[in-house]
Amino acid sequence: MKPIPIMRPYFTDEEAQLVAETLISGWVAQGPRAAEFERLVAKYEGVRFGVATTSCTTALHLLFAALGIGKGFDVIVPSYTFVATANAVEYTGANAILADVSTDTYNIDPERLESLIQSRYEGGVNKETGNRLFGIVAVHLFGLCAPIPAINAIAAKYGVRVLEDAACALGASIGEKREGTFGNPSCLSFHPRKSITTGEGGMVLTDDYELAERMRGLRSHGASVSEVQRHSSKGYLLPDYDELGYNYRMTDIQAAVGVAQMHKIDEIAADRRRLAARYDELLPEAAPFLRTPFVPEGYGHAYQSYVTMMRADETSMASIDETHAKRNALMDALEQAGIATRQGTHAVHTLGHYREKYGYRAEERMGAYACDRLSLALPLYAGMTDDEQDYVIEKLQELHAKE
Ligand SMILES: *Cc1c(COP(=O)(O)O)cnc(C)c1O
């Protein structure tokens, strides 16, 4: 059996063909392909506008900057997420306040979110720092939507915004509603670890025309005329740069890959769901020490990652730490057998910048800590064969029997 990676991008000849066309056309910076990619993704998600960027990290930063988030504001972020979610808040000068998550869904827990708001804020103002609470970043971790109806209701009650980090959530849904249509701007990633990839890339989705226009300007150094306009009739005119902007433009070379990826999104999404269902069916018997991902009723999981949890007493540090050692030994043994695994993602409050700036102790966000220490992501990618998946499952069973 060849080594099984944690993920592998799914390309056909079309990606290479569209990239070649783009190179030959001579327009390699942001142009018509990026605009086409934006339209394809926005249409797929059911949203009016897409603003393509160089990554989800820069998409988040662009959105936050366009909304005026900065010094003097707090933004609540889940404590179990990729560090970029919190970093993008901190880039603006605002403080990322970490909320604990549910170990079932890995997403923000609405009850703990509301008690965090009640204990820290008085009339929207942080009782310790005087910062104003701007909003909440709901992360749809690993492709499962955060409980947006509850989060939207809490945000409305306290008069703050909800912004979505949908890096993992292209195609995810709650009931009939696709990610992107929950009434909030959201940010996608096209890193190779996600469902579709452009190498690196991201996009902000929104129904708000003014916000989209503002982001298009800030994405391009703060220009008040678009690149396409600049290259059309009066190409000799420079745009105005009225405010401090960024260069966060996705290139047309990347977008060409993205367009080809969007042409097979249904196939990719269906394959990921099929493989996840197969793990769901076979793991409980083969590897009873693992808890398979929980999907609340009515939620459509996109399975950017298939993340299991080692069973342990999640309320006890001793039990978590003991099982953590077993998980790492298992990951080692799997690596020896040619199977790549990862922990789901990290507990942000335990990472250097956040631990030092805010003085968090690990046990202050127990849900996130348990997810960090106990999670185990198994290989899953479009094009993974049944034989490859069976090999992963057999090895898990074998290693369990040896214990
Ligand atoms: C991958 C990821 C990001 C960062 O995406 P990039 O495109 O790599 O910048 C942000 N948030 C979450 C939840 C992610 O999984």
Image (cartoon, rainbow, N blue to C red):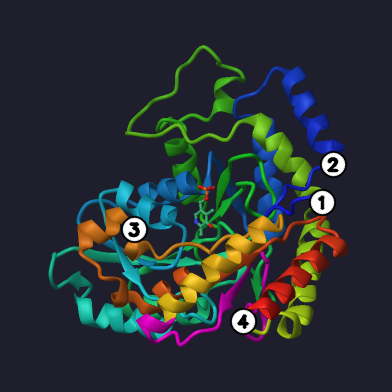
Q: Quadrant of residue 180?
A: bottom right
Residue 107 shows up from this direction: no
Name the disc covering residue 12, or none.
2
Q: Which residue, as the protein is rendered here, is positioned at the far front?
A: 402
User: What amino acid does circle 2 point to?
Assistant: Thr
The quadrant of the picture occupied by the N terminus is bottom right
Disc 3 is placed on an element classified as loop
- Residue 311 covered by magenta stretch: yes
Give the labeled residue for mark 3: 351
User: What is the spatial separation of the Cα atoms under label 4 and label 1, in whole angstroms?
Assistant: 31 Å
Which sits earlier in the primary sequence, circle 3 or circle 4? 4
Residue located 48% across and 29% down the image = 225
In the picture, measured across the screen, residue 287 lies left or right of residue 369, that is right
User: What amino acid does circle 3 point to?
Assistant: Leu
Indicate yes or no: mark 2 CB to ligand 1 under 8 Å: no
Where is residue 271 drawn, in percent x and y?
81, 62
Which sits earlier in the primary sequence, circle 2 or circle 3? 2
Which sits earlier in the primary sequence, circle 1 or circle 3? 1
Give the labeled residue for mark 1: 264
Select label 2 or label 1 by which is in front. Answer: 2
Where is residue 36 drawn, in percent x and y?
70, 40
Which sits earlier in the primary sequence, circle 4 or circle 2? 2
Disc 4 is placed on an element classified as strand
Residue located 65% across and 79% down the image = 292
Give the labeled residue for mark 4: 291
The main secondary structure of the magenta stretch is loop
Which sits earlier in the primary sequence, circle 4 or circle 1? 1
